[in-house]
């Protein structure tokens, strides 16, 4: 992806280097195994992991506290921050245009919070183990950039466009929030049984994948920044964090009725559909098959 020298977003909130704890007791009380499961469960997702964290945090109680010296960037850190800023700016350019032209309304930009280890979000206290997430309550995307090392090392999904896809997926959740889709899904889940609620979660996640594809299409049409292999990087990341891929890796077998984010095939297919169409209308995951 050609990103150097291009506009960076003003909506970055750099909280790296700050140490955040709840009630002076350190991080939320989840054991090592729990953290791994949360990481595997939460990669490139929306609200479910935050619900879990919120439950734990409410049990612990106490205010959050923040300490630490100003973050000292290395050259590599600075390059990664600038990359995130460019990708976020690209999402702003795309969604402002789509909202005005296709939806007849104004796009409200989210902020993106960079953090280290743990963060106090509008959705509760969260550790980096949950992976990148979007909080609909404060309309912010949160990411510990160490996640990108995990994406490459643990899940075999390297490349800058794989990283861009992560951000675009979370911004896709912001789009869903602005359009009222997330709220409707949450309300429907509260009335549904477990299996039906899981299916609604899958549909929401697949739509965010499709919206990430719309972003990629529109960015390429407007700026011609994609390089050979970029799409494969994004689809490789989508496949790597499919529910079936994660279940095979962690337990050796697949339980489709427990899926909450979609299979590898579904996630790749919906991202590709968004990319090929470039249209939000193509991202109706709730009425079509798969």
Image (tube, grey):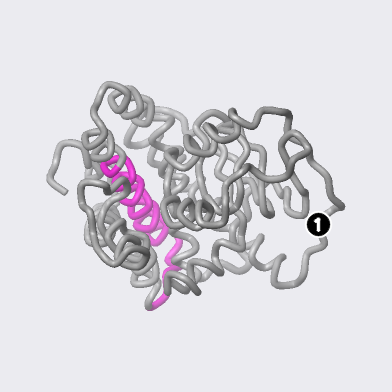
Question: Does residue 10 appear anywhere in the picture?
Answer: no
37 and 262: which is toward the camera: 37
Q: How many marks?
A: 1
Dominant SS in magenta = helix
Question: Does residue 199 appear anywhere in the picture?
Answer: yes
**Does residue 71 appear left or right of residue 93 in this picture?**
right
- Residue ID at (28%, 46%): 279
Image coords of residue 77 (percent x, y): 70, 66
The residue range painted magenta reads: 202-228
- Residue ID at (14%, 42%): 288
Query: Residue beneath label 1, please?
Result: 71
217 and 97: which is toward the camera: 217
- Residue ID at (50%, 32%): 136
**Does residue 174 appear left or right of residue 79 in this picture?**
left
**Does residue 281 appear left or right of residue 238 in this picture?**
left
Image coords of residue 168 (percent x, y): 45, 52
Task: Reply above or below: 260 against 232.
Answer: above
Examine the image and state in which quarter residue 11 appears.
top right
- Residue ID at (37%, 64%): 250
């Amino acid at each position: 992806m050609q990103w150097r020298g291009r506009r960076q977003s003003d909506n970055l909130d750099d909280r790296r280097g700050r140490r955040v704890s709840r009630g002076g007791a350190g991080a939320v009380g989840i054991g090592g195994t729990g953290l791994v499961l949360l990481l595997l469960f939460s990669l490139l997702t929306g609200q479910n992991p935050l619900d879990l964290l919120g439950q734990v945090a409410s049990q612990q109680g106490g205010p959050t506290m923040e300490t630490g010296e100003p973050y000292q960037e290395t050259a590599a850190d600075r390059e990664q921050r600038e990359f995130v800023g460019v990708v976020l700016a690209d999402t702003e350019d795309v969604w402002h245009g789509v909202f005005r032209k296709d939806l007849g309304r104004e796009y409200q930009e989210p902020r993106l919070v960079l953090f280290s280890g743990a963060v106090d979000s509008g959705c509760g206290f969260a550790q980096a183990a949950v992976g990148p997430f979007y909080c609909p309550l404060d309309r912010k995307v949160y990411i510990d950039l160490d996640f990108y090392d995990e994406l490459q090392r643990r899940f075999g999904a390297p490349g800058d466009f794989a990283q861009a896809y992560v951000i675009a997926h979370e911004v896709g959740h912001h789009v869903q929030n602005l359009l009222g889709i997330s709220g409707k899904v949450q309300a429907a889940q509260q009335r549904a049984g477990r299996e039906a609620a899981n299916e609604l979660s899958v549909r929401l996640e697949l739509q965010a994948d499709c919206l990430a594809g719309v972003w990629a299409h529109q960015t390429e049409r407007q700026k011609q920044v994609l390089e050979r292999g970029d799409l494969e990087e994004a689809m490789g990341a989508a496949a790597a964090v499919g529910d079936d891929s994660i279940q095979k890796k962690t337990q050796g077998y697949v339980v489709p009725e427990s899926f909450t984010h979609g299979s590898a095939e579904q996630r790749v297919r919906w991202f590709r559909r968004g990319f090929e169409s470039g249209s939000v209308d193509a991202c109706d995951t709730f009425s079509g098959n798969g």
